[in-house]
Amino acid sequence: MENTNAVNDVLEQRKQKFITANTKIRLDHLDDFYLAIAAACFLNNALDNSDLDGSVAYRNTPAPDYWPLHKEHWKLESVRQDLIRSANLLIDEIESIDRMAEGA
């Protein structure tokens, strides 16, 4: 089965996280599903503000009150890019849960 552009973009962003040391978060030390909550924030913003896609207004949308990370990590680009980010954060959350289960 061939990957779609969307799948390739998610995989490419995951690869880039390891090549460029953008933001280092110790994933296994985050509690209470922080990564899943962050994913939900990006997803909700993309859904709520899709009419502003790509505009300065979209990129300047403030982080929601329930954003679990530092405000400096709330960086919006476009609906598509933020959905990719959301997918990656969900994968990170699942991988963290798996690592914790293996170590238990």
Image (cartoon, rainbow, N blue to C red):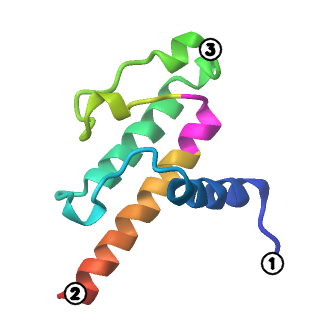
Q: Residue 82 colored magenta?
A: yes
Q: Position of residue 99 (x, y in %)?
A: 31, 79
Question: From this viewpoint, which residue is outermost toward the right?
Answer: 2
Residue range corresponding to the magenta coloring: 77-83
- For the residues carrying marks 1 and 2, which lies nearer the camera in this image? 2
Cα distance between the residues tagged 1 and 3:
35 Å
Residue 5 placement, left or right of 41: right
- Measured along the vertical axis of the image, is residue 75 above or below residue 83? above
Residue density around tag 1, few if under 14, some if 14–19, many if 20 or more, within 10 Å: few
* Amino acid at the residue labelled 3: Ser
Q: Position of residue 70 (x, y in %)?
A: 25, 34
Q: Are marks 2 and 3 in contact (CB under 8 Å)?
A: no
Badge 1 marks a residue whose secondary structure is loop
Report the residue at 31% width, 53% height from top.
Answer: 25
Label 2: which residue?
103
- Measured along the vertical axis of the image, is residue 61 above or below residue 42? above
Sequence-earlier tag: 2 or 3: 3
